[in-house]
Structure formats: C-alpha cells, structure tokens
Image (spheres, helix red, strand yellow):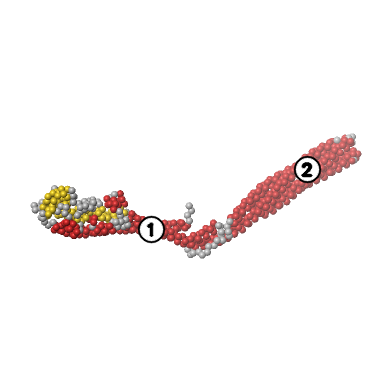
Amino acid sequence: MKKTLTFKILGPFLSAIALLALLGGWAMTRFASNQLHARAERERGASVEGIALTLSAADALLQAQVQGAMKTLQALASGAASPGGPVTVGGAQVPDLRFGGMGVANRTEWVDTVASRLGGTATLFTRQGDAFIRISTNVKQADGTRAVGTALDAQGPAARALLRGEPYYGLVDILGAPYLTGYEPVKEGGGRTIGALYVGHRISTLDLLARPIAERRILEGGFAALVDAKGGIVFGSGTVPTELQAAVVSGAGPAEQWTIQRQAFAPWGFEVVAAHPKSDVAGPLRAIQFTIAGVTLLACLSLGVLLRMILQRTLIRPVGAVHDGIAKKDLTVHLDGLSEDEVGDLGRAYNASNEQFRGIFRGLGADSDRVASGSAELSATAEEMRTSSDEIARVSERQRDGMSRVRQAMDQLTRLTAQANAGVVEARDRSAEAVEASHSSAQAGASASEAMEAIRQATTRMTSAVGVIQDIARQTNLLSLNAAIEAAKAGQMGKGFAVVAEEVRKLAERSATSTREIRALIEEVDAVVGRGDEAVRSSVASLDSIREHIASLAAAAEQVGGAMASQLSTKDEVLGLVEATNLDIERSVSASTEMAATVAEVARTAADLARVAESLAGTVASYRI
C-alpha cells in the first residue's frame, strides 16, 4: 500500500504524541486510581472511625442509663429479699420472689416505672435451680406479649455471673436481640442468690446509633453497618438493601466484588463494617480513562488536522505541483510564492531544471526534424540508387545477350571463313585446270561470291552487336555517373556506393574501348571481304578474262587465302575481346548486385534513422515545452 508523504511525516509525529499522551494518560490514570483508592480508604476509615466513636459515646451513655435504671429498680425493690411460694408465670410453675414480704410475680409496676422514667427495659428474675426465669418484665416477645416465664440464656455471660453471685454489665442477647444490660444478683439473708434484677436498652431501638449509620454512604454504592456477634446487621446504611449488606458482611458471593473494612468494637463484641463495590473505584477510573483517551484522541486529531494543514500549505502543495508537472510532462509549470527553506529550494531547483529541459527538448525537437529530413533524403537516394542498380543489371543482361549473339556471329564467320579458305585452296590447286574447267571455275567463283556475301552479312551483324555493346557501355557509364552523384549526396553513408559506382564506370569504359577495337577489326574484315567479293564478282563476270589471266587469278587466290588467314586471326582476337567483355559484364553484374545490397543496407539504415527520429519526436512531443 502506497504511503503518502503526509502519512510518513504525520505518522511518526502523531505516534510520538499519542505515545506521550498514553504515558501521560497512564500517569494520570495511576494518579486518579491512587486518589480514588485513597478517597475510598478515607471514606471507609472515616465511616468506621465515626461509627466507632458513636458507639463509644453510645456505650458510655447507655452505661450511665443502665446504672441509673438499675439504681431506680434497686430503690423500688429495697425490701428484704426472700423466696416465695410457687406461682404460675407464663404457664410455668416457678418460685415467687418477695421483697419486704411482697411477691412480685406477674406484677409490672416496678418494671414499667423504670421504663417510664429512664427508658429501656427492666426485669425481675426468680431462680429455679440454675435457671433464672422472668416473672416480671416489660421485655416483649415477637407477638407483643410480655416475655414472662422465659428463661435467661444459661450459656450467656450474665447467667454465669449471676450463678457466681456476681453482677454483670454488658451486651446480652435477649430473645434474639442485642441489649446493653445490667444484672444484679438478689440474695437472701444467707447470701444465696435467689433471683436477679435486670435493666437494659435494646441496641436496635437507639436512634443515637441508627440515624448516623443509616445516613452513611461509602462512595457511590457503599454502606456502613454495625454487625452483632452473630453476624446479623444491627444497623445499616439506608442506601443499600439489608439483604445485600448481610450477604457482603457474611462473605457470600457478592462479597468478591466489594472492598470491605472491618473494625471490632470490643465493649459490645460488635463489628463495624464499611464496604463499597469495587466498581465504585473501577467505574470512575474507567470514566477517567475514557475521558483521557477521548481527550488524547481529540488532541491527536486536532494536531493531525492542524499539522496536515500546515504541511499541505508548506510542503504537500509545492511537492504536489512538482509531481503533477513531472507526471503530466509539462515543462511550462513554474512554481511561485516559494518559501525560504528547503521546500522553496526544491521549487526553485525545479523551475531551473524546467528551463534547462525546455532548451534541451527544443534542441532535440530540431535535431529529430533534421534526422527525419536526412533519413527521408537518404531513403530517396537509396531508392534512386536501387533503380539505377536495377537498370545497370538490366543493361548488363542485355550486354550479356549481345555478347552471346556476337559469339554466335563469330562462330558463323569462322565457319564461312573456313569454307572460303577451302575454296581458295581448291582454286589455287586447280588453277592449272582453270582453263579446262572454266565452267567449274565459274561455279566456284559464284560460290565464293555467295560466301563473301555471307561474310559481309556476318560482319554487318557483328557491327550491330558491337554497337549494342557500345550503347550498353555508354548507358552503364551514365548510370555509374548518376550513382556516383547520388553517393556524393549521401555523404559518409554513400562512400561505399561511390566506390562501386566508380568500378562500374571503369568497367563501362573498358567495355567501350573493347567494342571500339572490335568494331575496327570488323570494319577491316568487312573491307577485306568486300574486296574479296569484288574480286570474285570480277572473276565471275570476266570468266573469259580469268581464263586468259589464270596467273592473275592464282595470285588473287593467294591474296584471298592470305586475307582468309588474316580473317581467321582477327576472329580469334574478336573472340578474345568477346570473352573479356563477358568477364567485364559479369563483374558489372556482380558490382550491380553488391550495389543493390549496399542500397538495401542504406535503405534499412534510413528506415532505422526514420524510426529513431520518429521515436525522438514522439518523446519530445509528449512534453509540453
């Protein structure tokens, strides 16, 4: 995935900012966590300490009230104590208790007097064995009736103290409820404990304790509670259901999610508990963390947007302009308003390079035009040279055909000359018989005349063939001159072709020279044959004169024989010249073939140059200059 310059710059910077923000957030979270835990600990401690102080004050107050109530009850029961007869109390038979001879079973005056004066509860106990039975009390049961006939808890500290004959002041469970109590043994004259006096206050009815605890709340969802020795909730905060408080205090399932602080209140055997859900700390902490994360994210985004705007104005926009100019191949782009920094230096360097490239590409455009023009001219020259080469090849072919006809004519001339020579020999041998065989001589003269005519016709054809060869040589010479001119136009590329053209010209000149020599020889042969023909015709016309001048005929025959020998010798020279001409023609054909190959190479080179020029022109055209 392609990464932009903005991302490459902003990424590390924002990452560093985010890292610093995270570190700061972590530190702030730690600080907030410590503060929240400290606050929770302070609130728990304050609640525990506050309740403990309240309990101490309540204990002192209640102790004073118990002492006062006990004195009041003792004052009411000031007569001598003695056991009485059996009485029915609450459905049970128990010994009565007498003070000053008055039984107190089922009588409520004294206990109600204490309650009306000092509050709380009061009871008169009678002893039955080791048990202490309530025979007069204002302590009520759950159904609202007085708890007469009920026994004091034999396992409690009060019962044990009374059996020892000792008073007891402290917390006692009475009918399932805690009371701050005072017990004084009632003894008969012999010192035996026969009953007991009781005064006390039920803890759960004390507004002095109930209101402060009910109003306490630890953090958002915590509570404070006063727990008795059995683990029951005596008083608890009104903000949390009692069942939940009991479950937390007892250590049941929900307790794992709570932070609990306990402090024992030794005078009563109670326990002060302050607890709050762990979420009361974790929740605000998470809120703080989310707030820090949100602020960090918002700060990073704000910084990112601000930095991006700055980068866009100072870096991305100039770099983008440079990129667009390069991508669009637009060399006319000029960056303005550049800053005095590295980015501005880049823009100025880009402007300078565009100026340089415009000059370079203009020069390249002109060069490509010149190359294209030169390649076109070179192609045209190559085409002309190819045409000339083809023409030379055709002319050379015609020269070859002409030389073939010359050879054929020379062969025929040889045969005719041989025949004529045989006739001359025969005429010479038979000159002595010329007179007797005049008729034969006339026929021989006629034959010689016909042979001479054939020879003249052959020489005429040879002359025509030599004329053709001369025409071909002249045309070849002209073509070689044209080729040399075109090679000179091609410059360096046409040097090889110029050499070939020069060789062709030389061959053409040699062919012309040879044909002139052949023509001279043929004309000489023709002259000789003409003279021979005239002599033969004169012999035929003047058979009688021949007959008379046999010596002259013999001399003429000798002359004709010499001429025939000379003609045969000339024939050999003509054949040699024909062979030389054929070789020159072959070299001319080879040179024209080589010239054609050179022309093809020149054409390919011109095509390559044209393609290079076209490619260069296309490259230059793709840039806007």
At horizontal 43% and vertical 60% (from top left) the residue drawn is 302
Q: Position of residue 360 (x, y in %)?
A: 57, 59
> In the rendered image, which quarter is residue 445 located in?
top right
Residue found 12% across the figure and 50% down from its top? 85
Q: Amino acid at mark 1?
A: Thr
Foreground mark, 2 or 1, reads: 1
The residue where tag 2 is placed is 570
Relative vertical location of residue 473 with respect to residue 429 in this rendering, above or below:
below
Residue 407 can be seen in this image: yes
Q: Which numbered marker is on residue 529?
A: none
- Mark 2 and mark 1: Cα distance apart in space: 129 Å
Q: Residue furthest left?
A: 190
Q: Secondary structure at mark 2?
A: helix
The amino acid marked with disc number 2 is Thr
* Towards the viewer: 421 or 282: 282
Q: Position of residue 359 (x, y in %)?
A: 58, 60
x, y percent for residue 588: 70, 46
- Camera-side residue of 455 and 528: 455
Relative placement, left or right, of 560 versus 324 is right
Q: Is residue 139 left or right of residue 611?
A: left
Q: Which residue is mark 1?
A: 291
